[in-house]
Image: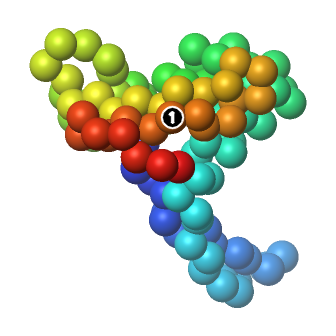
Amino acid sequence: MSSDGHASLPHYDSSGELLAIDIAPLSSLHAAQVEAVLTHGVPMATALETVTQTPAALWGLRDRGQIRVGAASDLLVLDSGTLAVQLNFACGRHYLF
């Protein structure tokens, strides 16, 4: 998934005044994907593309966002029912999640 974890999350009052800036947890994109699929019925392929292929394309990262020969693909294996992360592979190594 896109590495936008730790993105800034600004909070404003009703007049548009900045109150605070929080930092998104690394799990924020996965949580949004799970909510989109399980709560709002977004097809898994669509939800997955929005956090992988689309950001990579917008940033011009041709070797990211897809699983293909020559790509720097990291993989999350998700439970088919809950979409909980079961396995995490990055840079060719298995990591605990």
Asked whether, in this view, residue 34 is left or right of residue 49, the answer is: right
Q: Position of residue 21 (x, y in %)?
A: 60, 79
Look at the image and tell me whether residue 76 can be seen. Answer: yes
Look at the image and tell me whether residue 55 can be seen. Answer: no
Q: Position of residue 42 (x, y in %)?
A: 73, 20
How many numbered dots are placed on residues in this image?
A: 1
Asked whether, in this view, residue 87 is left or right of residue 66, the answer is: right
SS at circle 1: strand
Residue at the spot x=83%, y=76% of the render?
14
Dividing the picture into quadrants, the one containing residue 41 is top right
Is residue 87 or residue 14 the one in the foreground? 87
Residue at the spot x=68%, y=36% of the render?
84
Asked whether, in this view, residue 77 is left or right of residue 40, the answer is: left
Colour scheme shown: rainbow
| Disc 1 crowd, CA 10 A, few/some/many (<14, 14-19, 20+) | some
Residue holding disc 1 = 87
Answer above or below: position of 53 versus 12. above
Answer above or below: position of 51 versus 96. above
Is residue 60 or residue 38 the one in the foreground? 38
Asked whether, in this view, residue 16 is left or right of residue 50, the answer is: right
Quadrant, the N terminus: top left
Residue at the spot x=61%, y=42% of the render?
30
Name of the residue lying farthest toward the left: 70
Q: Amino acid at mark 1?
A: Leu
Q: Position of residue 58 (x, y in %)?
A: 33, 35
Q: Position of residue 66 (x, y in %)?
A: 33, 20
Is residue 15 or residue 31 the one in the foreground? 31
